[in-house]
Image: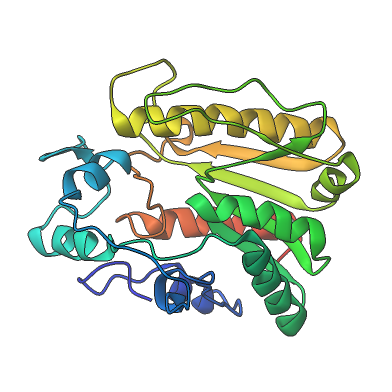
Amino acid sequence: MLADNTGREGFNDMFLRKRYATYLVDLPGRGRAGRTTAETAIRPLADEQFWFDIFRIGEWPAFNPGVQFPTDKDSLDQFFRQMTPDIGTHDMTKELDALSALFKRVGKGILVTHSAGGFPGWLTAIRSPEVRGIISLEPGTYVFPEGEVPEDMPSLTGTMKGIAVPPEEFNKLTQIPIILYFGDYIPENVTDKLGGENWRVRLQMGRKFVEAVNRHGGHAALVELPKIGIRGNTHFLMSDKNNNIIADHMAAWLRQNKLDR
């Protein structure tokens, strides 16, 4: 899969070149698996500016300074074409059944999740012993042991809530290496910016998730890319112009945790 219309490679090709068997997954009702028997109503919306802002590409129509998202007209047009209506039913049971069935079929492997895929990723690792590790790119939601869920985090785009799971289920996440990646333009304090606010609380909750995993004896890490000198990344780390640098960092983590065998 190409990262953009210029022919740059995406993570799929990059990890194939690193000699990893790679599978791209669309959850039921999403992307190329969007055909569904569920009924829905689709309203036409002129929401391009919203997506541009919420995913930290910039504040429409200005790009963020130093942004790694390709700023040419054709790439932006291609991005907007990907913002199709959501016709998925968001049936978590079906999503978990599908991911678990995939791992049973292909065997042990590393689960790479992104955004809304982060939550079903945690639950898949809890129920599937074939998941050897998780790389989560800016996950949207987190699980915590019952009785240890952090306080809600209000923000301009809604309240961020942790999800409670039984301690014995959460402990399964402590048995595998986990790493989270977050990009740039995420503030520490409350702002009036959609993108900044949306990911401010998700980053802060992510820090608490990593703390909880490690407190229970796990092996979790959170990489804030600007803090290690990698700047300009949007919510789409896999398709930003420096995606090769991020892929190399991910590959090094896999080697360090003996997940490349």
Q: Quadrant of residue 79?
A: bottom left
Image vertical order of residue 179 relative to residue 98, above or below: above
Task: Give the x, y percent position of residue 239.
Answer: 35, 60
Is residue 180 in view?
yes
**Position of 231 compared to 121: left or right?**
left
Q: Quadrant of residue 244?
A: bottom left
Give me the residue at 49% from left, 50% from top.
115
Task: Give the x, y percent position of residue 191.
Answer: 33, 18
**Position of 231 compared to 14: left or right?**
left
Task: Give the x, y percent position of residue 166.
Answer: 85, 41
Image vertical order of residue 43 relative to residue 208, above or below: below
Image vertical order of residue 216 relative to residue 254, above or below: above
For the residue pair 118 and 165, the one nearer the viewer reads as: 165
Picture quarter with the N terminus: bottom left
Q: How many marks?
A: 0
For the residue pair 45 and 4, the one nearer the viewer reads as: 45
Give me the residue at 25% from left, 51% from top.
69
Is residue 67 in view?
no
Residue found at the very far top of the displayed protein? 189
For the residue pair 97 and 240, the one nearer the viewer reads as: 97
**Position of 128 compared to 152: left or right?**
right
Q: Quadrant of residue 6?
A: bottom left
Picture quarter with the C terminus: bottom right
Give me the residue at 69% from left, 52% from top.
122
Colour logic:
rainbow
Give me the residue at 80% from left, 65% from top.
128
Task: Give the x, y percent position of residue 7.
Answer: 25, 75
Residue found at the very far right of the displayed protein? 168
